[in-house]
Amino acid sequence: MNFALYRELLAVRPIRRLLLVGMVARIPHSAAGVLLTLHIVLTLDQGYAAAGAAAAVMTIGIAVGAPWRGRRVDTVGLRRALIPSVIAETVIWSVVPHVSYEVLLPLVFVGGLLTLPIFSVVRQSLGVLATGSSGAPPSRSTPSPPSWSL
């Protein structure tokens, strides 16, 4: 595998910045499970089993919603697909700390369902940055994905 091509791609400042922002943007979603667990165990005085159930409900929502959200980004465009996610996440995660456990479960499912499709956003942006908005090949050679063979 020729890593020099990846080095050339990462030498492009906007691409490097996009990948860094993409990594940082995943932090709140990674922390959501931990915060949800701590809230349920410490604030709502439920056990870790209840916290695990809520995390599972949120994960199921993410698993169901991720392909749908990614397709929305591809079909209606980035801005139109992100607006419902941003509004829903703002409302839902602002309300979650103030509701009972029984109301929290459907809220975290919907929150997971409408999670911001960070990977789709980074993928689409990377495609534009790597090829340019005209669709012409980049000035630097773009690395091909690794081929896995046994």
Image (cartoon, rainbow, N blue to C red):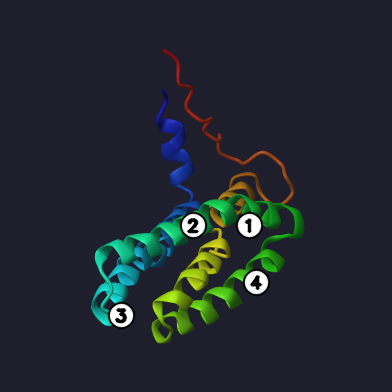
Element carrying mark 3:
loop
Tell me where residue 121 appears, x and y as whole percent.
58, 57
Please indicate, yes or no, whether residue 120 appears anywhere in the rendered image: no
Which residue is tagged 2?
18
User: Tag 4 or tag 1, which sits nearer the N-term?
Assistant: 1
Q: Which mark is residue 25?
A: none
Which residue is tagged 4?
84
Element carrying mark 2:
helix
Q: Quadrant of the C terminus?
A: top left
User: Tag 2 or tag 1, which sits nearer the N-term?
Assistant: 2
**Label 1, label 2: how many angstroms apart (C-alpha)?**
20 Å
Please, what is the three-letter code of the amino acid marked with disc 2? Answer: Leu
**Label 1, label 3: how many angstroms apart (C-alpha)?**
31 Å
Marks 4/2 in contact by CB < 8 Å: the verdict is no
User: Which residue occupies the foreground of this view, 96 or 122?
Assistant: 96
Q: Which mark is residue 44?
A: 3
Which residue is tagged 1?
69
Element carrying mark 4:
helix
Q: Residue at x 46, y 39 (%)?
A: 8
